[in-house]
Structure formats: structure tokens, C-alpha cells
Amino acid sequence: MPETRKNVSALAIHPQSEDPSTHRSTVPANTEDAAELTFVPSVKEGKFAFLTTLRFYEVLVMGQILALCLVSTNTLSGLLVKEGTSIPAFQSFFNYVLLNLVYTSYTLYKYGFKKWTQVILKDGWKYFILAFLDVEGNYFAVLAYRYTTILSAQLINFWAIVVVVILSFLFLRVRYGIPRIAGILICCGGMGVLLASDSMHGSAIGGMPTELKGDLFMLLGATMYGFSNVAEEFLVSKKPLFEVVGQLAFWGMLINGTQAGIFDRDSFRSATWNGKVGGYMVGYTLSLFIFYTIVPILLRMASAAFFNISLLTTNFWGVLIGIRVFGYVIHKLYPVAFVMIILGLIIYFAFQNSLGEAQKPWLGLNQEKGIAGIGTAKKRKVKVDIETGTGGSSAQGMTTGVGTMSDGAGGMVGGQGPLVFKEATA
């Protein structure tokens, strides 16, 4: 039977993805046969369509919060070194432990132990690879600063953006138009202005000679960051956030703990331990916890490419904090560079539709292969009563439409006639 919908383009309907947090096999008490479905919201096309949405400002602010989190971890790492405590692998271990306590515990609560073990048996290898890339990316990036200059390391870190764009193009079918490429180039140009300013005033060099060994470490770390960002974007678009972060933390804790036990034993024994060091470690861990919590949401709402170019402002925020903590002097080119990066981020989204990058090309035209959750292009679940033909949702601000639904195989859902449904607005 052909579909007869009101405002078809605005009300695409698909069976709910298997998200334990949103899908239930049970039905409402007053029905014997019901289905849960999700909507892909209406899409507005045209220039600046995405820039007029609240979602754009959310991803812009989230990107800068993540940049500030990185600045905090870098600053606290510097303070730890000043106190005589340099344990790069062991520092991150507490973050994975905290993430594990929160997200793995919640996963066990939602799934139960049996289903949690099934996730490990079925998809554990995927999460192990993700965690390995994440742990080693962190380790080699920190290690690189022992051998090379900050200027050289920052330049090589641009490679992470290149890796993300190439991987997204080849494996996730993401296509970058001229505006997005121009936005990325403008952001990179802004970062180049920051680095040039540092070089001219000597603040980025610090008298340390550039070493090939350090450059190679940073190149390896940036490559692993790129792979891990793309892998995480793919996984969070299909799986619940608590599962992905919990599994990342679980395997990351094991990998990082093993690595710290091997490489940081001597550093741990010779480290200074006092109240200040304890405070710095707590601040470092909490900053990383916030970072790892927000990243998957941003990857759902935007992309791994946007995430990486958002972090280009890290150096700017770092200098502002460094003025207070380390006595840095801000140079006149810094505000210019910051404006260039923000402008590049705006241009990146200038010609995208109102969903921006939340609509992932690998999830199908109407995101039927994806999950309905925080930040995704799918709207909230809608329960549809097959017998009575009525539907409802807990979301506020409902609008009603009338139509029939195909089950994807050409037949009617439940073999019934016209159904009444409501479109969720959040």
C-alpha cells in the first residue's frame, strides 16, 4: 500500500534502533500489540540553515569547553613536573578508573552482568582497539614533549586533522564540500598565526633543540588520535553512550595500568608526593573525566573533524591561563588567531542543512541504522498502538499527523491500516 503521509519530508519514520536505554520489548498496559518508532526531524536547507539553530551554538560551546579541559590537563601536568612528579602513563590511569566506576557501573545496571559479558564477547575487540588507540595516543603525545619543541609538536599535531578527514572520507562516506574545506583551512591558518607568534617571541621554543625522535613520537600519537576519534564517532552513532564510554574506560584501564606498571615504575618511586601533587592529580583526573564525557556527545552532534579543529583554540586558552599561572605574556596576534579559528568553525557549517553533521551518511538516508539518543539526528521514541492506531510520546510540544507506515518489506506494520502518530519535538 502506498504511503499517505502529511508532510512526508518532515516525518520520516523507522523502527527504533536497539538502544537498551530507549527500546523496550514490553507494550503499554492497555494494548496487546504496540511498536516503538523514531522520527528523523524535518530538515531545513539553504545557506546558514544550521547556523540559525540552537544545535550549532551548542556544538561551538562544547568544542571550547573541551579545549579548556585540555588546557587544564596540560597546565596541571606542567605543575606536576614543577613539583618533581612526571608519570605520564600513570597520570591517566585514575581517569580510566573513574570513568569505569561511573559508566561501567551504569552499563551493568542497565544491561545486567549477563548482557554486559555478551557485549564484551561480541564487541569487546572493537572497544579494545578503540581503547588501545586512545591510550597510546595520549602516551606518545606526552612523550614527544620530552624530545622536541612545543612548536614542532603542535605543527605535527595538525596531522590528526588530516587523518580524520581521510578516514572519514574513505570509510564513513563523508564528503567535504568547498565551504567545509575552506573552514578547516582557515582554522589551521589561525593556528599557524599562533605558532608564528610564539616562534617570533621565543615562547614556544624554550631553548630546546628539535629532535627527530620527538617529532616521530608526536606524529605517531597524532595518527592514533585520528584513528580513535573516527572509530569513536562511528561507535557512538550506533551504540548507547554509556556502553561506549564504559567499554573504553574498562579496556583503557587495563591497557594503561599495564603500561604504567612497565614504564612508570621508576618515575613513580622517585616522584614527589605531597598535598599539592594530590590536588593537581585530582584536578587532572576531573578535567579528563569531563573531557571524555562530552567528547562522544559532540561526535554525535558534529563530527571527529569538527572536534579536532575546535581544539585548535587550546593554545589561545592555554596562554590566557598561563598569564596567571606561569607569567606568560599575551601577544597581539593571539586575539586575531582566535577570531580566525572561530570564523573557520562558522564557515565549516555555513552551507549545511539544519541537522548539520548529526545526520551521518553511514547510517542511511533516514538514519535507520543509527541509535536514537542524546545528540543524534533521530528524535525521541514514539509508542504507536497498532490496535487503536494512536500514538504518544513523553516529549513536550507535540504535533499530530495521520498516515500509514511501511515496515520496510512492503507490508504494513502489524498488518494494520492507517495509524495516528505524533512527532516528538526534542
Image: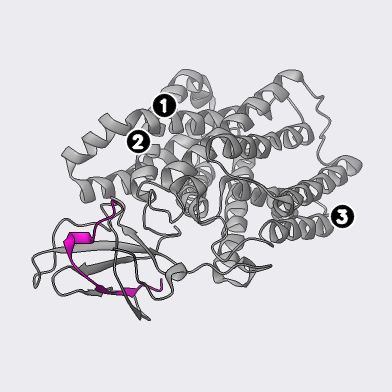
Residue at 49% in and 24% down: 269
Who comes first in sequence, dot 2 or dot 1?
A: 2
On the picture, is 248 further left or further right than 116? right
Q: Which mark is residue 250?
A: 2
Q: Is residue 414 magenta?
A: yes
Q: Does residue 318 show up?
A: no
Q: Quadrant of the N terminus?
A: bottom left
Residue drawn at x 8%, y 65% is 32
Tell me where residue 356 appears, x and y as whole percent. Answer: 57, 60
State the mark number for residue 333: 3
The amino acid sitting under disc 1 is: Ile
Residue 162 in the image: x percent, y percent?
68, 36
Q: Which of marks 2 and 3 is nearer the N terminus?
A: 2
- Disc 1 packing (10 Å; few <14; some 14–19; many ≥20): some
Q: Is residue 142 left or right of residue 22?
A: right
Q: Is residue 143 above or below residue 201?
A: above
